[in-house]
Image: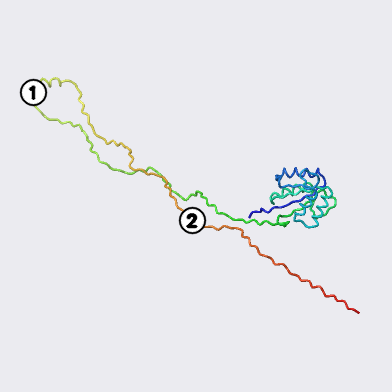
Amino acid sequence: MSNTAQTTLVGLFQNQEQTSRVLTDLQNAGIPTQAVEVLGGGATTTSAPEQSLATLRTLDLPPQDLQLLSDGLKSDGSLIIVRTERAMSARAEEVFASHQAEKIDERRPQSQARTAAAGADGATDSTVIPVIEEEVVVGKREVQRGGVRVYTRVVEIPVEEQVVLREEHAHVERHAVDRPISEAEVDALRDQSIEVRETVEEPVVAKTARVVEEVRIGKEASEHTEQITDRVRRTEVEVDQIPGDETTTTQPNRSKTRQ
């Protein structure tokens, strides 16, 4: 709900020096120059006395306040009028208050400044009811939902294989003979040594490693749409008219009796 109603603030000051300071403070507070009007007091933006009184009568103020402001103008006082929205009028009120401004209905006889406020529609006070509405903002976050843990370990498995092994064994045989010696055997009539070595085959085990399987670990992403249901709150404003009390006053009839 936006509040765009215009508010009129009126300040009465008794000397030009104070009026100049108020105008400077209003400008520093961000009040637009076109929203400020000065009546009376001999200022450069001051209207003629008759025109000042005519402008004053256009303000929707109680008669007693209008009379008080008129008397101030007739006493060479300066009247500062600020017409702006309510959001900006709060700054103007602070400026008036900093210069010891007083409310008109206080009726203090020697006050340096007097102020009055009137809305564009004649209302002097208003209440703003904010209408609040919630909105749903849906976001995302990551949470842990478990997973897969893979262990590797080395185990031993018994295996059996067959291999053929060859063995050599030395043996000596003696045979009884009776024959004449040959010339080749004459050389054998001396000392000599003859060796015959036995051989045997033993199993030799060698191991080689080969990759026989691969286990691949990874993640696969997928998406799905989920409907979110929630409740939001908002302010609802209902306006009811309050009927006024009608009071009827009956005056008693008074009659005179002629003698």
Instruction: Tell me residue 230's x, y (percent).
Output: 54, 57
Identify the residue at image location x=70%, y=67%.
243
Q: Nearer the viewer, mark 1 or mark 2?
A: 2
Residue 206 versus residue 104: which sits nearer the camera?
Answer: 104
Residue 227 bears which disc, if any?
A: 2
Residue 31 versus residue 66: which sits nearer the camera?
Answer: 66
Q: Amino acid at mark 2?
A: Gln
Which element type, helix, strand or loop, lies under badge 2? loop
Identify the residue at image location x=57%, y=57%.
232
- Residue 108 is left or right of residue 231, and the answer is right
- Depicted 177 relative to depicted 66: above or below: above
Q: Quadrant of the C terminus?
A: bottom right
Instruction: Tell me residue 85's x, y (percent).
Output: 69, 51
Instruction: Tell me residue 48's x, y (percent).
Output: 79, 47
Q: Amino acid at mark 1?
A: Pro
Q: Quadrant of the N terminus?
A: bottom right
Residue 211: quarter of image: top left
- Residue 257 is left or right of residue 25, and the answer is right
Q: Mark 1 sits on what residue?
A: 180
Q: CA distance from mark 1 to mark 2?
A: 121 Å
Are dots 1 and 2 in contact, CB under 8 Å? no
- Residue 156 is left or right of residue 191, and the answer is right
Q: Earlier in the sequence, mark 1 or mark 2?
A: 1
Residue 208 versus residue 217: which sits nearer the camera?
Answer: 217
Residue 159: quarter of image: top left
Other residues around mark 1 within 10 Å, as few (<14) / some (14–19) / many (≥20) = few
